[in-house]
Image (spheres, rainbow, N blue to C red):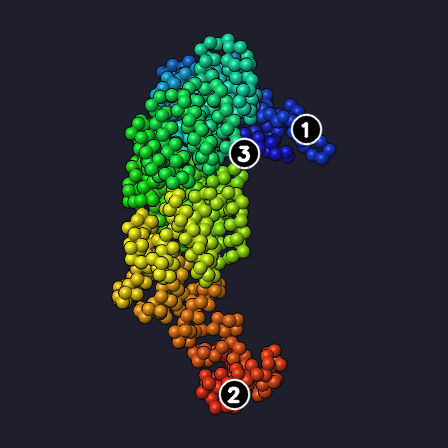
């Protein structure tokens, strides 16, 4: 059975064998289902039809109930499987006094059943409603649809309740086309509380412009509530109704538009209203496409609006394109769009919005004066805007600027913006503000919880661009927490999608994060490969170049125990951030300060300067401030203060395993050199963690420093786990253990040398070392010592 026919049977029969048989018979009888040599095939194009016999049977059952009930049922069937009884009655011209009797008769005849709502009813079978509709003539469909639509407006003309989406396609005498404005099944409510039904009814009544205007309002509302995909779908359906050409409505200058190059304007005011609806639909489609990251299609829609829209609408278009250019990292294009807005002199509200968008561009554009310029523009927008959306946008920029100076002030501005967004149901803005608050939570507590909420909300809303930025920020939190797999997964996904959507700035952010993930694992080859890609895409000039240098290349060099190279990259990163302050709070100052302090390049003033800054409020940077203080206290002879600072560091660094053990390594060396604290414990803890993480060089550096302090260090070579604890405590090495195993077999030096591929002289040295470490007088005593432990093979393995 072909898929279209099966789908039709499942959807329309309700599982009733009689309906299945009737539908199949109708498909075959009308030639819609054709028997071929290899089985059944459907006739293209496929059309869902009600078999004539079934339609006649249902119509006859309705007619037997009398003309009033029959008219009521036909009007109800036109509305859908579920319908509000009072609307169907008004459309059928049924008096209120007769409605109860009609409902009783139709219910007793088992044609309809009460639904959950007081005014709600539904046909017992979906095919019943479809059959009734199929018996109506086109003129009857148009007349009943117009009256039903007017009834909806009459019952509740001012309702602004969010529409409920209803499943199921509309079914008239002919199958619904691609421009169908909405589903046929409506909840049993009244008035414009379900405007998709009103849009469909006006379309069936022949007033596609009115239907399109309703869909424009739905699309606008959906976008404000964060349902980007729904907004695109509603706008496209409305455009299709007006242009009659699905899939081409976004092309500028096309034919067939109302009152333009197609059919002459014969309807006066209606054509003008249709033209207004066309502009409204394209305007909301532009916004939704930008939210979804569909920049190419957005540019096409923007061109049309710039040619055809009013001055105010053209200004709004340029504003949207300016913000899109900023998101993509095209600062010059964005500023040109803003200049176009200002040249139009579109009024105070659009001027305030232009200030807010230009503030956003200034905040993201890596220039020395970015923060001051952004704050001036955002402050002016906040004072001049009446629109809640523009006020939220201005507050977001002000919060972003404050984040580099005062985290508490940034949080207060975000809270203010969130209150506005929630009061006015601005879901898109709410997502952005939750993201900003999530960033602050990550900075303060390394907590990704609120970022995850913002991410899931953005995904549900279809806000692709926002989702990618949140993914990058989540990847940073996972990176600092040592969750490298999750960090890489998120950053790679963000990079792939950004590349596909040609979002250059977002792609560079994701690539910089991936570089840092590789660097924090000491993966030099992968780090260098990602850095080469970063540079080839112009990353040297991007905001996140400093992060790639410091948090990336600097950390990789530090893990390799190349302090000079690590300092070079971190110092270069700080120099760039001092010249061009980034729009985000950097995690470079903390590690840079610690390296400067342990090497004697920084003192008390530098430590306290960072501690008192916004960067110093970040938990990541504060842990390094505490270690820097500990180093200085130790040098000054204040050992107790130094140890207390290290203890505070231990608590603060708990979420950051790599940073914690790098810090213990560096402070352990400093404490050992200056004679304070517990350097052996700190270096031992660092060595054990580095070894378990597979970071060979820092682990070896810690062991070397411990040996210099006279500490017997556990072997980490292959085979060290086979050395018994007694021998391990005596400092017996892996090679000495191998020699001891052969000594117990009474082999001589030459035989041992041949087995282990060593020179006899080297074997002689190992035997001498074993005699010294075990305190045995000769080889016989050494063999007996090993035998008393159960022999090297007992638990020497």
Q: Position of residue 704 (x, y in %)?
A: 44, 70
Quadrant (top left/top right/bottom left/bottom right) for the N terminus: top right
Q: Which residue is mark 3?
A: 15
Q: Is residue 609 above or below residue 102?
A: below
Q: Secondary structure at mark 3?
A: loop
Closer mark to the observer between disc 1 and disc 2: 2
Closer mark to the observer between disc 3 and disc 2: 2
Closer mark to the observer between disc 3 and disc 1: 1
**Quarter of the image where one finds residue 223:** top left
Query: Of the residues under marks 3 and 2, which one precedes in the sequence?
Result: 3
Decide: few, some or many residues near mark 3? Use Cα within 10 Å; few <14, some 14-19, many ≥20: few
The image's mark for residue 783 is: 2
**Quarter of the image where one finds residue 394:** top left
Q: Is residue 494 above or below residue 643?
A: above
Q: Position of residue 97 (x, y in %)?
A: 36, 16
Q: Observer-nearest residue: 65 or 70? A: 70
Q: Position of residue 769 (x, y in %)?
A: 49, 83
Decide: few, some or many residues near mark 2? Use Cα within 10 Å; few <14, some 14-19, many ≥20: many
Q: Secondary structure at mark 1?
A: strand
The answer to whether residue 598 of the structure is visible from this angle is yes
Q: Secondary structure at mark 2?
A: helix
The answer to whether residue 142 of the structure is visible from this angle is no
- In this rendering, position of residue 671 left or right of residue 749: left
Label 3, label 1: how many angstroms apart (C-alpha)? 23 Å
Q: Observer-nearest residue: 674 or 504? A: 674
Q: Is residue 399 above or below residue 116?
A: below
Q: Observer-nearest residue: 702 or 535? A: 535
Query: Of the residues under marks 3 and 1, which one precedes in the sequence?
Result: 3
Q: Position of residue 367 (x, y in %)?
A: 40, 39
Q: Residue furthest right?
A: 37
Q: Which residue is mark 1?
A: 34
């Amino acid at each position: 059975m072909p898929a279209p026919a099966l789908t039709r049977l499942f959807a329309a029969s309700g599982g009733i064998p009689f309906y299945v048989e009737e539908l199949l018979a109708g498909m075959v009888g009308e030639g819609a289902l054709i028997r071929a040599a290899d089985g059944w095939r459907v006739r293209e194009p496929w059309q869902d039809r009600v078999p004539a016999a079934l339609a006649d049977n249902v119509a006859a059952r309705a007619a037997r109930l009398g003309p009033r009930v029959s008219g009521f049922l036909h009007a109800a069937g036109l509305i859908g499987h579920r319908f509000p009884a009072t609307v169907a009655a008004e459309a059928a011209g049924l008096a209120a006094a007769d409605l109860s009797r009609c409902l009783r008769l139709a219910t007793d005849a088992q044609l309809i059943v009460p639904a959950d709502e007081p005014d709600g009813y539904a046909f017992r079978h979906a095919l019943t409603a479809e059959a009734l509709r199929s018996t109506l003539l086109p003129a009857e469909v148009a007349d009943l649809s117009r009256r039903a639509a007017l009834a909806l407006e009459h019952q509740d003309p001012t309702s602004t309740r969010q529409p409920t989406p209803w499943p199921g396609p509309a079914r008239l005498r002919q199958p619904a086309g691609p421009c169908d404005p909405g589903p046929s099944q409506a909840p049993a409510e009244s008035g414009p509380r379900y405007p998709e039904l009103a849009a469909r009814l006006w379309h069936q009544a022949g007033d596609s412009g009115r239907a399109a205007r309703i869909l424009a309002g739905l699309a606008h509302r959906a976008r404000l509530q964060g349902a980007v995909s729904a907004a695109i779908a509603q706008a496209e359906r409305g455009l299709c109704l007006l242009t009659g050409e699905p899939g081409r409505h976004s092309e500028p200058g096309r034919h067939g538009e109302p009152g333009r190059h197609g059919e002459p304007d014969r309807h006066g005011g209606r054509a003008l209203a249709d033209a207004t609806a066309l502009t409204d639909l394209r305007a909301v489609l532009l916004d939704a496409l930008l939210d979804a990251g569909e920049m190419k299609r957005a540019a096409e829609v923007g061109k049309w609006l710039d040619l055809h829209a009013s001055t105010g609408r053209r200004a709004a278009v340029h504003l949207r394109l300016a913000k899109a250019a900023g998101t993509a990292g095209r600062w010059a294009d964005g500023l040109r769009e803003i200049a176009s807005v200002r040249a139009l002199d579109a009024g105070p509200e659009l001027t305030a919005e232009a200030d807010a968008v230009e503030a956003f561009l200034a905040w993201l554009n890596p220039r020395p004066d970015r923060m001051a310029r952004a704050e001036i523009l955002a402050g002016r927008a906040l004072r001049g805007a009446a629109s809640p959306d523009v006020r939220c946008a201005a507050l977001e920029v002000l919060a972003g600027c404050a984040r580099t100076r005062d985290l508490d002030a940034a949080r207060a501005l975000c809270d203010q913006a969130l209150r506005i967004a929630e009061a006015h149901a601005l879901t898109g803005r709410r997502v952005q503000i939750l993201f900003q608050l999530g960033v602050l939570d990550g900075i303060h507590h390394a907590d990704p919880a609120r970022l995850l909420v913002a991410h899931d909300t953005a995904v549900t809303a279809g806000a692709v661009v926002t989702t990618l930025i949140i993914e990058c920020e989540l990847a940073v939190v996972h990176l600092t927490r040592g969750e490298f797999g999750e960090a890489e997964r998120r950053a790679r996904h963000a990079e792939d999608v950004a590349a596909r959507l040609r979002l250059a700035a977002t792609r560079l952010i994701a690539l910089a994060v991936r570089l840092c993930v590789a660097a924090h694992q000491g993966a030099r080859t992968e780090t260098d490969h990602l850095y080469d890609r970063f540079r080839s895409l112009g990353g040297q000039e991007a905001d996140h170049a400093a992060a790639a240098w410091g948090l990336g290349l600097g950390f990789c060099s530090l893990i390799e125990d190349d302090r000079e190279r690590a300092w070079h990259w971190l110092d270069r990163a700080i120099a760039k951030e001092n010249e061009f302050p980034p729009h985000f709070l950097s995690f470079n100052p903390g590690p840079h300060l610690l390296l400067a302090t342990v090497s004697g390049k920084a003192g008390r003033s530098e430590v306290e300067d960072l501690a008192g800054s916004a960067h110093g409020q970040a938990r990541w940077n504060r842990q390094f401030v505490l270690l820097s203080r500990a180093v200085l206290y130790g040098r000054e002879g204040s050992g107790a203060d130094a140890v207390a600072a290290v203890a505070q560091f231990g608590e603060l660094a708990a979420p950051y395993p790599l940073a914690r053990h790098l810090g213990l390594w560096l402070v352990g060396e400093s404490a050992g050199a200056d004679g304070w604290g517990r350097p052996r414990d700190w270096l031992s803890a660092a060595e054990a963690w580095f070894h378990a993480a597979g970071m060979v060089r820092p682990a070896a550096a810690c062991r070397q420093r411990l040996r210099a302090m006279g500490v017997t260090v556990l072997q980490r070579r292959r085979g060290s786990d086979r050395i018994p604890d007694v021998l391990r405590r005596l400092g017996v090495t892996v090679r000495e253990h191998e020699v001891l195993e052969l000594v117990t077999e009474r082999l001589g030096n030459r035989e041992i040398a041949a087995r282990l591929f060593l020179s006899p002289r080297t074997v002689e040295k190992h035997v001498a070392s074993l005699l010294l470490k075990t305190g045995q007088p000769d080889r016989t005593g050494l063999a007996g010592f090993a035998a008393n432990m159960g022999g090297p093979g007992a638990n020497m393995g």
